[in-house]
Amino acid sequence: MDTNWIINTIGQLANIGDGERGITRLAFSDEERRAKEYAAELMRQAGLSVRFDAIGNVIGRLEGTDSTAKVVLTGSHLDTPPDGGKYDGVVGVVGGLAAIKELMARGPLTLPVELVVFTAEESSRFGYATIGSKVMTGLTNASSWNRVKDQTGLTLKQIVKDSGLNLAEIKGAVRNRDAIQAFVELHIEGGPYLERYRHSIGIVEAIAAPTRLRILIEGQAAHSGSTPMDERKDALVSAAMIVLAVQDIAMEHAHQGTVGTVGIMRVYPNAMNVVPGRVEMGVDIRGVDHASIIDTIQDLKDAISTIADGQDTPISIDVLASEKPVKLDDSIALTVEGVCNDLGLKYSRMPSRAGHDTMNMAKIAPAGLIFIPCHKGISHNIEEYAAPEDIVNGINVLTETLYKLAK
Ligand code: HGY
Ligand code: MN
Ligand code: MN
């Protein structure tokens, strides 16, 4: 395996969308498009046939000896959150191509193998994630995209159209579940456990699902100097109470693997001399235990209702996403486990606390998710780092897993 090519290619991709505080390749941005085109060119150079589907997923294909056979898929994404890191998604795309190149060197496989770069995996732009794999698995269609908006108010429907994609053709990107043998994704853990426990590989058994809320607090803008403290309807004070409620309630459910974050806060009019009249918040609740997620959401709604009454600031909640945790197919996990034993790599079976395209692919085919450690569990941050040795271990495990599935 050409480790230099792998590390250099990760470096090349990092130049696309590289900024002062990190890498930014938002969903449907010019930067994501350039990264996907770069990946498509690498696939062509490797000898794969390459196509873009109707939502912009890039699909590179290596034919097998039995062209009627089901296809073995691998892949990940190249979009990032704002100021993100170099490895999230990239390891699965570059690693997937490195694995396929390795398999090509061994000679023909029976089943065809495809590498997919999924469009718009991150929720950063719309609060709605994994759009490319949702389209590929028939879990979303353009009819609902008028309600999905980015932070400038542009709808997903408009952005897809502006990207030069044809909404009428989106349905054509849905893959036939009978045509897919398996899907396996390689990804950084995005959390601290593999490095902490010194395991080289994580074999994911279940993927946490997000519930995302947009919360609107209506107070009353007022003069910050002349308005008496006991006569204010300060929307930001209510918002601050909600931030602490998310923290406290998620902590109460943390033992069940549930987490909660307020990642977006927009204050209006956001002026030093005006009592905030309106605040818009984004809340992200994740977990692998569905009952715990339901309890967390209910406890939060109760807390918000109490805050609204107590502060006399009406509060509305809009559910942007509400997905169920996904259990992965044990047959793929067992295959990966066997490969780790063959390679003498220490591994642990574990949940994924982040969302991935594998969640959707698992709905139409047996799916697996292979994790490698990332330093101090840092992700969605320019400090995100995966060591070359860990990347190579992950690619070796992916290569042998794909080989067992496709030979
Ligand atoms: O946000 C996530 O769970 C992942 O990074 N898409
Ligand atoms: Mn991510
Ligand atoms: Mn990712």
Image (tube, helix red, strand yellow):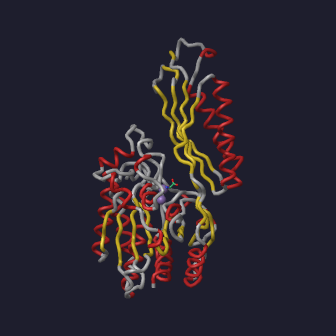
Q: Nearer the viewer, residue 170 or 99?
A: 170
Image coordinates for residue 293, horizontal then vertical, percent: 65, 50
Image coordinates for residue 102, horizontal then vertical, percent: 39, 81
- Residue sticking out furthest to the top: 226
Image coordinates for residue 279, horizontal then vertical, percent: 52, 30
Is residue 28 found left or right of 294 in the rendered image? left
Image coordinates for residue 330, horizontal then vertical, percent: 61, 73
Q: Nearer the viewer, residue 141 or 120?
A: 141
Quadrant in which the C terminus is drawn: bottom left
Asked whether residue 383 is in view, the answer is no
Quadrant in which the N terminus is drawn: bottom left
Asked whether residue 251 is in view, the answer is yes
Picture quadrant of residue 63:
bottom left
Residue at image coords 68%, 43%: 249
Is residue 222 found left or right of 45 in the rendered image? right
Picture layout, residue 186 above or below residue 106: above
- Residue sticking out furthest to the bottom: 107
Count of residue discs: 0
Picture layout, residue 189 above or below residue 225: below
